[in-house]
Image (cartoon, helix red, strand yellow):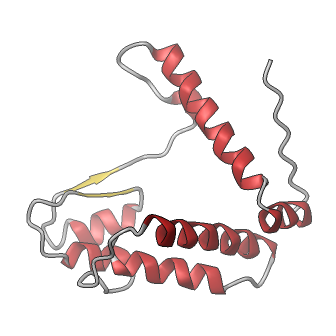
């Protein structure tokens, strides 16, 4: 994990001016606790912020940087000549698989539902979702 990413998580954890930032803060806090529990190694050489810059300056010549941030891809990674891939997030119903499409789509959907349900089980996250008037109801039949 690049150190710059950990710094960004700490910044998100500290900012909670409105309900949406509070939710982002709670999610960042959960992620930080998981990073600590799993003892994810942190690369302290990658410290420049924003994190895309730190990752682009990282010295591993074999690294391929992956982002959905168009500006980072066009302005940082390409300008510095780094091998990179630009992702385009899509709704699940627009994702095309090469084989076994329906079962994979169902697997992705179940996984997303499980993540959502797990997050909503956290008391702080649940309270923030309630403040935002967001309810998560899951009924599998």
Number of residue marks? 0
19, above or below 117, in the image: below
65 with respect to 68 (left or right): left
Residue 137 % position (x, y): 85, 39
Q: Residue at x 12, y 69 (%)?
A: 60
Residue 73 % position (x, y): 30, 63
* Image quarter hosting the N terminus: bottom left
18 with respect to 11 (left or right): right
Please name whichever residue, 137 or 101, is drawn nearer the observer in this view of the structure.
137
Q: Residue at x 23, y 67 (%)?
A: 77
50, above or below 137, in the image: below
Q: Residue at x 35, y 18 (%)?
A: 98
107 with respect to 122 (left or right): left
65 with respect to 23 (left or right): left
67, above or below 141, in the image: below
Please name whichever residue, 49 or 28, is drawn nearer the observer in this view of the structure.
28
Please name whichever residue, 28 or 75, is drawn nearer the observer in this view of the structure.
28
Quarter residue 97 falls in:
top left
Q: Residue at x 91, y 58 (%)?
A: 133
Residue 102 % position (x, y): 53, 14
* Image quarter hosting the C terminus: top right
């Amino acid at each position: 994990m690049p150190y710059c990413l950990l710094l960004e998580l700490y910044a998100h954890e500290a900012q909670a001016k409105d309900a949406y930032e509070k939710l982002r803060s709670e999610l960042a806090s959960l992620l930080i606790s998981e990073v600590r529990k799993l003892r994810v190694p942190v690369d302290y050489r990658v410290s420049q912020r924003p994190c895309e810059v730190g990752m682009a300056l990282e010295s591993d010549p074999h690294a391929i940087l992956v982002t959905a941030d168009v500006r980072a891809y066009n302005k940082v990674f390409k300008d510095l000549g780094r091998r990179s891939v630009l992702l385009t997030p899509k709704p699940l119903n627009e994702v095309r698989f090469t084989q076994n499409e329906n079962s994979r789509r169902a697997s992705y959907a179940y996984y997303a539902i499980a993540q959502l349900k797990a997050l909503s089980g956290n008391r702080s996250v649940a309270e923030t979702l309630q403040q935002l008037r967001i309810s998560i109801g899951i009924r599998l039949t």
